[in-house]
Image (cartoon, coloured by chain):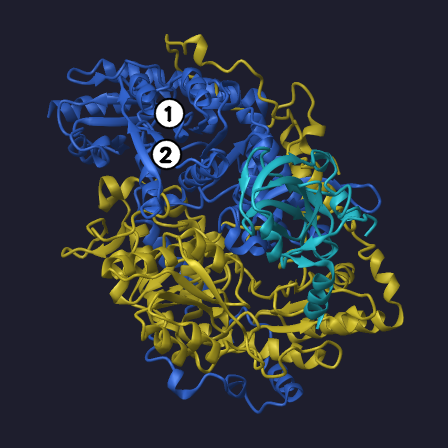
Chain colours: A yellow, B blue, C cyan
């Protein structure tokens, strides 16, 4: 398929600007002017529409395909939330207005205030910041809060403890905040090795970062005891909220002993992934950390108005330019209002039901590293298939030919040839059966004709791109 | 059941049988009674209709009806309908990060085109597939410069947005980085101070063009100074201005960043926005964020993949360039659509129209008694005026007259109580500008 | 190994042999195999001082990036410029044409901290179990 630049024809226009209705005398002095020509294409609106429409048709998406990516919570994105975010009163609002006069943005501030309250109640925390613009951004904010707490107390803390099963953003965030990383192994039951943890925790432990349920889809019943161990050295326990979809209404990180949590609105609260963003990663804290939260915060004044509050001298400052990805927050807000107490609990229940169903359907065909009930996602190993020369990536390419987006592969790192399946609550039994059928077919094919996998996918416009060539040649700009 | 759950009660029964559990509660056996929530006081669910009605009522309490002269980095531009029509195709917005290239060529090619468009805009070699926003992009550029040079002294021009400077300070308060800020003199970068402070310990100097006060500058001399000392130059730019103004590439800037909201994104009360970053090819491995690269497949067909992922958190973990996981893919795609529609001539025309209108507004406001329009530097779309009374009061009165008059600089610059930053976009008609001037005149007379 | 030199190894899978008193350094078969197709090698500056077991270079493949640690302390006197255009030399000829750098050692006694080829082969067996 051509690039938009290859469709360019001199003289074509995509969009006409209204004619200038003023005349001004001044000119920009010559040295300030651009001498080069900007090489943007010259295409008509129809060219652009055909081009991007055709491009979109080259994507798998939740709206077109089953998309059971583990750890991503690819649940259905309700259309009314798009409409909500598009309401003119939200979409056209300038972020600086409440900094001039809070009465100019009462609606937006109300949304932020209520989201703070709702998320606090859902997670069992005391206060939230909605500023972080993505999950990883929330993690970084969370670790910065941890560091601020310890600094204020004069604690000498050198390291953060992270399970070996953790997502790469955890150690990356901790390192950026200036901490060393201590890794604790996962035990034979698929949860954190408690004995190993007890040995490594010492007064210099700043805290522990935990995903719960963990990245193997397993809920560690000892989580509260783990929190106590960390608290005993005045460490803080951080909750990576990637898997919150497993337990809404059944358990709250705040009750389990977590001091800081981050949530992914684009996972648990159904805002769209957008092909890789924009997301939103609000961070919640227990009151002992509230004073460090980023500013501004939204408060209710004596006159019952909503206002921005910057009066927090211990705040870590700004982690983003404004109040967070408001356009994303509105969607999550609408979703929470629609589902309500019962709907959120139901979502988790069906997420867990669907994952266990998949586990049951596939355990005869794929190795299960930890043979126990899973939560909202299940992890298999393609090690049986690998012995025949068929790797997790080959099974993924086979699934693409069946019109199914592959599950997450090669994560978590501690499982060889990992295949992580998270169906979410919005998939039906019928679709899960179809998915299971495809996985079973792959397993059978791996036995009978393993060599054929090298050619998959065969039905897509492209197959097995040369990633080595891409990394060596680094062609990232059409014009260079 | 909530309408988003497809399974019926019959499905549930059947699935529980397969699993070998009596009830859904059985599946949660690992969550013990002591783990139960202390409370879960979320309001009960409502219908789609009720939720929408509620949101319309809430949204009505936001002042979007004001004729806007408020900018400060975020502008009220017209976004053609085709941008939303295309970006709201669910194949784009309900897809995930393109880790499986064969079923995500739509996103990957669109991002490759976005990268190329940003390079063409800025005259730089290589761009990433976007960062969260202009402020965090500037912070990332600074960290990148420190990685490249190994030097931790950063010179910051006072004309860089105070919002961005606050973000950078927040992130680096515990890092061993030395900041030196140079003032703005008559609207422009203070060369005298820069010469004094820039030395061979400097990792980078950070500039902005046009600067926060709206003034345009020509930074070639500063670039030469910095390079002579082995320091990099980072410049944050307003993308539409590059339809007319000298590009970072032409001047020799090493890393160009900026806020891409003006490239087809609504104001959205602060986000989602779009941070762009472009640099020299030799620095590509030190650049954070996703990068899409061109390659071929097993049959030699051109295609696109996420490349240089080894820099990223999911592989490099604690040694990653940054902890960034996502970009703002959908926003980048929206921007790519907008840039394609606008085209090279459209960009130039748009920039010209904006400049003309801003100049006209500047002229008009200059006619008001007591209003001093700052003229020491040329400006592009935004300019500073000094009022005879505090700007905050004027803004409140102008809001009652239906105008968002501008940004009061005192908000970030103590002592500048009477200063107002006024922005003009292509949406402001002659009538609106004249009405604005007349309203301001009335307000100042009263 | 095609070379007749006496090779020494580190736990991080670097090798070194001595050409007169100059140490030639590269990465071993185990490392290049684990990395997969190498796409880029970040080489040290000629003239730089390095310390034994400190990171002094790195290599990247599509799936991993690996730090390379100096087997000996000393000064870098030459780097393998061919790796710029052909990083895959490390995969194909990791003990010969895929050498990474040459070090002028500052303390030859540091050899005692390295493994002999036999010791390294035993070490490898220990890893696989």
Res. A62 in view: yes
- Determine the residue located farthest toward the bottom in the rendered image: B22
Q: Residue at x 68, y 68 (%)?
A: C127
Quadrant hosting residue B137: top left
Same subunit, labels 2 and 1: the answer reads yes
The residue that label 1 is drawn on is B199
Above or below, comparing residue A416 to residue B30 in the picture: above
Element at label 2 = strand
| Image x and y of residue B428, in percent | 37, 25
Q: Residue at x 38, y 47 (%)?
A: A90
Element at label 1 = loop
| Image x and y of residue B235, in percent | 43, 28
Who comes first in sequence, dot 2 or dot 1? 2
Local crowd size for mark 1, using a 10 Å CA cut-off: few (<14), some (14–19), many (≥20): some
Q: Which chain is disc 2 placed on?
A: B
Q: Residue at x 89, y 68 (%)?
A: A449
Residues at badges 2 and 1 in contact (C-beta under 8 Å)?
yes
User: In terms of depth relative to the viewer, which is nearer, B66 or C29?
Assistant: C29
The residue that label 2 is drawn on is B153
| Image x and y of residue A14, in percent | 60, 28
Which quarter of the rendered picture does the C terminus of chain B lie within? top left
Above or below, comparing residue B388 to residue A90 in the picture: above
Left or right: where B202 falls relative to B5: left
User: In terms of depth relative to the viewer, which is nearer, A135 or B196?
Assistant: B196
């Amino acid at each position: 398929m051509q690039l938009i630049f290859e469709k360019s024809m001199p003289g074509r226009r995509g969009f006409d600007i209204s004619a200038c209705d003023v005349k001004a005398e001044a000119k920009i002095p010559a040295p300030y002017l651009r001498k080069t020509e900007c090489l943007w294409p010259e295409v008509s609106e129809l060219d652009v529409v055909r081009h991007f429409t055709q491009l979109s048709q080259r994507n798998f998406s939740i709206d077109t395909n089953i998309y059971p990516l583990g750890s991503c919570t690819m649940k259905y994105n309700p259309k009314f939330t798009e409409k909500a975010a598009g309401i003119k009163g939200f979409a056209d609002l300038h972020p600086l207005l409440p900094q001039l006069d809070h009465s100019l943005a009462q609606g937006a501030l109300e949304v932020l205030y209520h989201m703070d309250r709702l998320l606090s109640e859902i997670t069992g925390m005391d206060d939230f910041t909605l500023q972080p613009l993505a999950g990883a951004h929330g993690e970084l904010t969370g670790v910065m809060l941890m560091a601020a707490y310890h600094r204020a107390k004069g604690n000498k803390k050198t390291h953060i403890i992270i399970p070996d099963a953790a997502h790469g953003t955890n150690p990356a965030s901790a390192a950026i905040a200036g901490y060393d990383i201590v890794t604790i192994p996962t035990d034979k039951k698929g949860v954190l090795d408690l004995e190993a943890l007890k040995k490594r925790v010492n007064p210099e432990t700043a805290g522990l970062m935990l995903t719960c349920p963990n990245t193997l889809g397993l809920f560690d019943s000892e989580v509260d005891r783990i929190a106590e161990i960390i608290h005993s050295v005045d460490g803080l326990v951080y909750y990576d909220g990637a898997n919150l979809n497993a337990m809404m209404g059944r358990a709250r990180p705040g009750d389990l002993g977590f001091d800081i949590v981050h949530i992914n609105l684009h996972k648990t609260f159904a805002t769209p992934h957008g092909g890789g963003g924009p997301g939103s990663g609000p961070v919640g804290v227990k009151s002992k950390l509230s004073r460090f939260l980023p500013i501004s915060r939204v408060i209710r004044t004596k006159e019952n108005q909503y206002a921005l509050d910057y009066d927090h001298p211990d705040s870590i400052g700004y982690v983003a330019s404004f109040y967070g990805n408001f356009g994303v927050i509105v969607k999550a807000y609408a979703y929470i209002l629609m589902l309500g107490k019962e709907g959120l609990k139901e979502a988790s229940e069906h997420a867990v039901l669907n994952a266990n169903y998949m586990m049951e359907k596939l355990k005869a065909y794929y190795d299960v590293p930890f043979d126990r009930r899973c939560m909202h996602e299940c992890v298999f190993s393609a090690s049986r298939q690998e012995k025949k020369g068929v790797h997790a990536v080959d099974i993924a390419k086979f699934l693409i030919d069946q019109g199914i987006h592959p599950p997450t592969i090669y994560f978590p790192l501690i499982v060889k040839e990992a295949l992580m399946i998270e169906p979410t609550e919005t998939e039906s039994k019928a679709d899960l059966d179809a998915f299971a059928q495809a996985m079973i077919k792959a397993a059978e094919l791996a036995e009978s004709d393993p060599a054929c996998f090298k050619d998959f996918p065969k039905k897509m416009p492209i197959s097995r791109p040369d990633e080595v060539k891409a990394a060596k040649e680094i062609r990232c700009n059409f014009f260079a | 059941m909530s309408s988003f759950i497809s399974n019926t009660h019959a499905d549930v029964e059947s699935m529980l049988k397969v699993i070998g559990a009596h009830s859904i509660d059985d599946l949660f056996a690992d969550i013990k009674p002591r783990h139960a929530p202390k409370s879960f006081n979320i309001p009960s669910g409502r219908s789609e209709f009720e939720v929408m009605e509620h949101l319309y009522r809430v949204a009505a309490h936001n002042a979007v009806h004001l004729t806007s002269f408020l900018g400060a980095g975020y502008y009220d531009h017209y976004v053609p309908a085709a941008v939303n029509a295309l970006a709201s195709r669910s194949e784009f917005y309900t897809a995930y990060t393109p880790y499986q290239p064969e079923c995500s060529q739509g996103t990957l090619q669109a991002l490759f085109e976005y990268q190329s468009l940003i390079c063409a805009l800025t005259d730089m070699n290589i761009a990433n597939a976007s960062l969260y926003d202009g402020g965090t992009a500037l912070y990332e550029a600074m960290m990148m410069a420190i990685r490249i040079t190994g030097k931790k002294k950063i010179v910051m021009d006072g004309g860089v947005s105070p919002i961005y400077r606050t973000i950078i300070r927040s992130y680096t308060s515990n890092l061993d980085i030395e900041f030196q800020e140079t003032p703005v003199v008559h609207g422009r970068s203070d060369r005298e101070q820069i010469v004094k402070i820039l030395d061979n310990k400097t990792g980078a100097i950070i500039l902005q063009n046009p600067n926060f006060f709206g003034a345009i500058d020509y930074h070639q001399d500063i670039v030469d100074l910095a390079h002579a000392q082995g320091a990099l130059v980072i410049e944050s730019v307003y993308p539409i201005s590059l339809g007319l103004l000298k590009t970072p590439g032409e001047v020799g800037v090493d890393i160009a960043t900026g806020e891409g909201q003006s490239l087809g994104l609504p104001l959205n009360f602060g986000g989602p926005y779009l941070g762009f970053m472009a640099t020299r090819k030799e620095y590509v491995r030190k650049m954070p964020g996703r990068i899409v690269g061109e390659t071929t497949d097993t049959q030699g067909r051109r295609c696109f993949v996420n490349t240089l992922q080894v820099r990223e958190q999911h592989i490099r973990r604690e040694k990653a360039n940054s902890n960034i996981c996502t970009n703002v893919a959908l926003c980048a795609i929206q921007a790519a659509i907008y840039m394609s529609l606008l085209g090279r001539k459209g960009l130039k025309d748009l920039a010209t129209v904006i400049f003309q209108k801003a100049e006209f507004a500047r002229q008009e406001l200059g006619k008001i008694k007591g209003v001093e329009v700052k003229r020491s530097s040329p400006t592009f779309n935004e300019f500073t005026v000094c009022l005879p009374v505090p700007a905050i009061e004027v803004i409140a009165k102008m809001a009652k007259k239906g105008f968002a008059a501008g940004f009061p600089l005192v908000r970030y610059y103590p002592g500048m109580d009477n200063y107002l930053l006024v922005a003009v976009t292509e949406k402001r008609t002659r009538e609106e500008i004249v009405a604005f001037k007349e309203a301001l005149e009335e307000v100042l007379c009263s | 190994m095609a070379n007749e030199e006496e090779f020494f190894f580190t736990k991080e899978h670097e090798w070194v042999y001595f050409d007169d008193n100059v140490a030639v350094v590269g990465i071993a078969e185990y490392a290049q195999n684990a990395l997969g197709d190498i796409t880029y090698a970040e080489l040290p500056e000629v003239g730089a001082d390095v310390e034994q077991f400190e990171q002094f270079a790195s290599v990247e493949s599509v799936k991993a990036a690996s730090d390379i640690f100096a087997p000996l302390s000393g000064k870098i006197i030459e780097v393998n410029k061919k790796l710029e255009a052909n990083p895959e030399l490390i995969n194909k000829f990791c003990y010969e044409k895929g050498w990474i750098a040459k070090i002028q050692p500052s303390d030859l006694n540091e050899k005692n901290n390295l493994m002999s080829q036999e010791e390294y082969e035993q070490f490898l067996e220990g890893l696989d179990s």
